[in-house]
Image: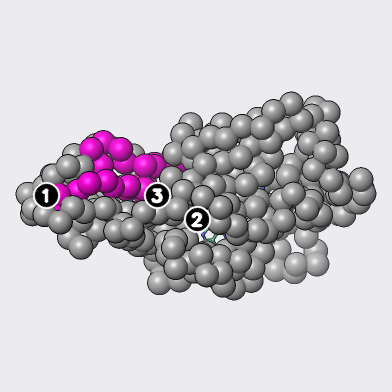
Amino acid sequence: MKHGTFAKRLPATSAAVRVTRGSSSRSRRRLPDMSFQVVTPYSLDEALGALASGEKLVPLAGATDLMVYMEAGTLAPCRFLNLQELDELKPTLSVNGSLTLGAMTTYRDVRVSPIREQFPMLAWAAREVGALAIQSRGTWAGNVANASPAADGVPALMAYDAEIDLWSKKERRRVPLAKFYRGYKEMDRRPDELIAALHLPLPQPGWVDYYRKVGTRRFQAISKTLLAGRILLDADRAVRDIRMVFASIAPYTLRAVQTEAIVRGRELTPEVIEEAAQAIQDEIHPIDDIRSTETYRRRVTSNLVRDFLSL
Ligand SMILES: Cc1cc2nc3c(=O)[nH]c(=O)nc-3n(C[C@H](O)[C@H](O)[C@H](O)COP(=O)(O)OP(=O)(O)OC[C@H]3O[C@@H](n4cnc5c(N)ncnc54)[C@H](O)[C@@H]3O)c2cc1C
């Protein structure tokens, strides 16, 4: 196991320093030095052993979220557990009855892989995440573990019924992504567990995918609302099965099971579509924040439902 330290000059939090940060000269800012340490294990056993020791370690994958928190001063000095040297978590996209994404699989890995033919929504979601640098560095597992309600990758994974492999020293378990989140940034992962992989069942023929993110700009914006949908229709346009997953309208990525139940088994008439567009209002809990308002999010989320079901 390799240990390293690097110093990060974090924005100050004390009132005295906040005053000096208003100064026009950046060099005159008085910012405290705070050290972060990096532990680099070279085997999964070593990594899980370190997590089991009880010491607080923060898993570090692509660091595209963690570095933002460091820069913003919202991450207290800590020890990172660097996952980049672990063969067992290496980027993989293997199809063997289901699609397996190794924990270090990035958005770019998906965008350039032939699996985008079978899982088009993964490629669409990957394209929405930041720009190329972030897509080359950020991982799907990091998007899941970061648990942002505005995550772009998680809704696509959830709409494909993804399951998560959670490994610790004492057990290996698999949980459905749709049951992983419990509240804002609360999830079914213990501190001694790593996300080792994500598994997606292979889609049966006939499913139609839909992914639409609504943000301030077409690209490089955080969503105000987002719908990742999949639908399987019978020949008479009755809904045989459906998934509707939303971002930015609840404390966590939300699969709208009640609205799905309203349309399942029914023909997609204008009346049924309108019923679903109204029903989604009872399932979402949008808020006013710097990116949007509750009113806007409610109205546009219903519009997304109409758009999706009018295919
Ligand atoms: C400029 C910029 C633009 C961005 N744009 C978008 C965007 O448009 N859409 C979007 O959804 N996101 C966006 N992001 C956020 C970010 O890129 C994604 O959330 C990314 O998927 C995080 O993956 P990572 O590997 O970098 O995670 P990290 O930053 O390394 O980790 C994130 C969190 O996950 C935990 N973690 C990581 N891997 C594991 C694991 N295997 N097991 C357990 N815990 C783990 C870490 O401890 C940490 O809490 C953006 C970020 C930046 C900096």
Quadrant where the image shows the C terminus: bottom left
Question: Which tag is nearer the camera, tag 3 or tag 1?
Answer: 1
Q: Quadrant of ligand 1?
A: bottom right
For image coordinates 11% across by 54% down, the residue present is 236
Within 10 Å of disc 3 (Cα), the crowding (few <14, some 14-19, many 20+) is many
Q: Earlier in the sequence, mark 3 or mark 1?
A: 3
Secondary-structure class at tag 1:
loop
- For label 2, the crowd category at 10 Å Cα-Cα, with few meaning under 14, some 14 to 19 and many 20 or more, is many
Residue 55 x %, y %:
82, 31
Q: Quadrant of residue 81?
A: top right
Instruction: Please count the marks in the image.
Output: 3
Using a 10 Å C-alpha cutoff, classify the residue at mark 1 as few (fewer than 14 neighbours), some (14 to 19) or many (20 or more): some
Q: Residue at x 55, y 56 (%)?
A: 95
State the SS at label 3.
helix
Please, which colouring scheme is shown? one colour
Q: Amino acid at mark 1?
A: Glu
Q: Which mark is residue 25?
A: none
Residue 235 image offset from top left, x and y in percent: 15, 56
Mark 3 and mark 1 in contact? Answer it, CB < 8 Å.
no
Q: Judge by depth and name the residue closer to the eye, 99 or 212.
A: 99
Residue bearing mark 1: 267
**Magenta stretch?**
237-261
Percent position (x, y) of residue 229?
33, 54
**Residue toward you, 214 or 259:** 259
Q: Which residue is mark 2?
A: 153
- Secondary structure of the residue carrying numbered label 2: helix
Q: Is mark 2 within 8 Å of ligand 1?
A: yes
Q: Identify the residue position indicated by label 3 in the image.
A: 159
Which quadrant of the structure image shows residue 120?
bottom left
**Rounded to the nearest whole Å, what is the CA distance between mark 3 and mark 1?**
21 Å
